[in-house]
Structure formats: C-alpha cells, structure tokens
Amino acid sequence: MAALLHPAREQFDLVDVLAALGHPVRMKIVQALASGAETYCGAIETGAPKSTLTHHWRVLRESGVIRLRHEGRRNYLTLRRDDLEARFPGLLAVVLGGDAGSSFPEAG
C-alpha cells in the first residue's frame, strides 16, 4: 500500500484547511473527532454515501486536519488538534464553536 500524504505542520495552508472544513460532511467528521480519541472511520455517522467518504478523508488528510492510519482492513482517524492549534491558534475552537469566540466583543 502506498504511503499516505500527511503534510508537516509548517506545510498547512489556511486556505486548504478552511476549504476542507467548509463542507458539511467533513465538518461532521471533524466534530466526531473533536474529543481527541482515535476513531474507526465506520463509527462516524455522516449521512454521506460510503463511496464518497474516501474523498472527504483525503481532503481532510491532505490539508492537515486529520491523520489517517490503516490497520488491516480498517481506517482510523485522528484530529490533528495540536498541529492545527500551533499553526493557526484558536481556529479549531472557533470552527467547533468552543470558548475561543468568547474573546471577541459582542455586537450590539
């Protein structure tokens, strides 16, 4: 099996990361991985056909958002939270609706 592309933290591009996070199915995957635990890909309910999930995993992996690991016939996914936080501080918290947004002044 060919080695998978997992870009180094320094290679993450904000446009690529935002494009990856901009699709509803990919956001469901990221939300499912937000706990930080490595997750079997079949355990993530996205509502998308299985035939398209490989594409979504590839976009997330190649942008640096997730790490994908093969074990036998299964794929395991992990959110690259530490790498994303180091490269784009606060981005994941904002995208996932965390407390990072509380530091912004409220409109009013």
Image: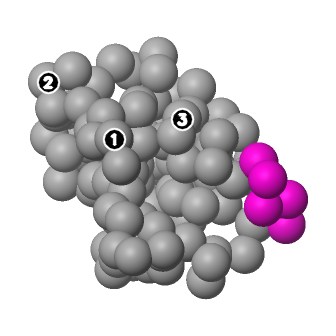
* Residue at 47 percent of width and 16 percent of height: 15
Secondary structure, mark 2, is helix
Query: Where is mark 1, residue-wise?
Result: 2
**Image height check: is 39 above or below 28?**
below
Q: Position of residue 103 (x, y in %)?
A: 35, 47
Query: Where is mark 2, residue-wise?
Result: 10
* Residue at 65 percent of width and 34 percent of height: 22
Spatial CA distance of label 2 from label 1 is 23 Å
Secondary structure, mark 1, is loop
What is the quadrant of residue 87 in the picture? top left
Nearer-the-camera pick, 50 or 25: 50
Question: Relative to residue 28, is residue 87 drawn left or right?
Answer: left
Nearer-the-camera pick, 90 or 77: 77
- Is 51 contained in the magenta span? yes
Query: Where is mark 3, residue-wise?
Result: 59
What is the quadrant of residue 99 in the picture? bottom left
Question: Callout 2, which amino acid?
Answer: Glu
Quarter of the image with the C terminus in it: top right
Question: Relative to residue 66, is residue 88 drawn left or right?
Answer: left
Pick whichever of labels 3 and 2 is earlier in the sequence.
2
Spatial CA distance of label 3 from label 2 is 17 Å
User: Which region of the structure is painted magenta?
Assistant: 47-52
**Image height check: is 104 above or below 57?**
above
Nearer-the-camera pick, 81 or 103: 81
Q: Position of residue 51 (x, y in %)?
A: 79, 53
Question: Callout 3, which amino acid?
Answer: Val
Front of the two marks 3 and 2: 3
Secondary structure, mark 3, is helix
Question: Callout 1, which amino acid?
Answer: Ala
Q: Position of residue 27 (x, y in %)?
A: 63, 52
Pick whichever of labels 1 and 3 is earlier in the sequence.
1
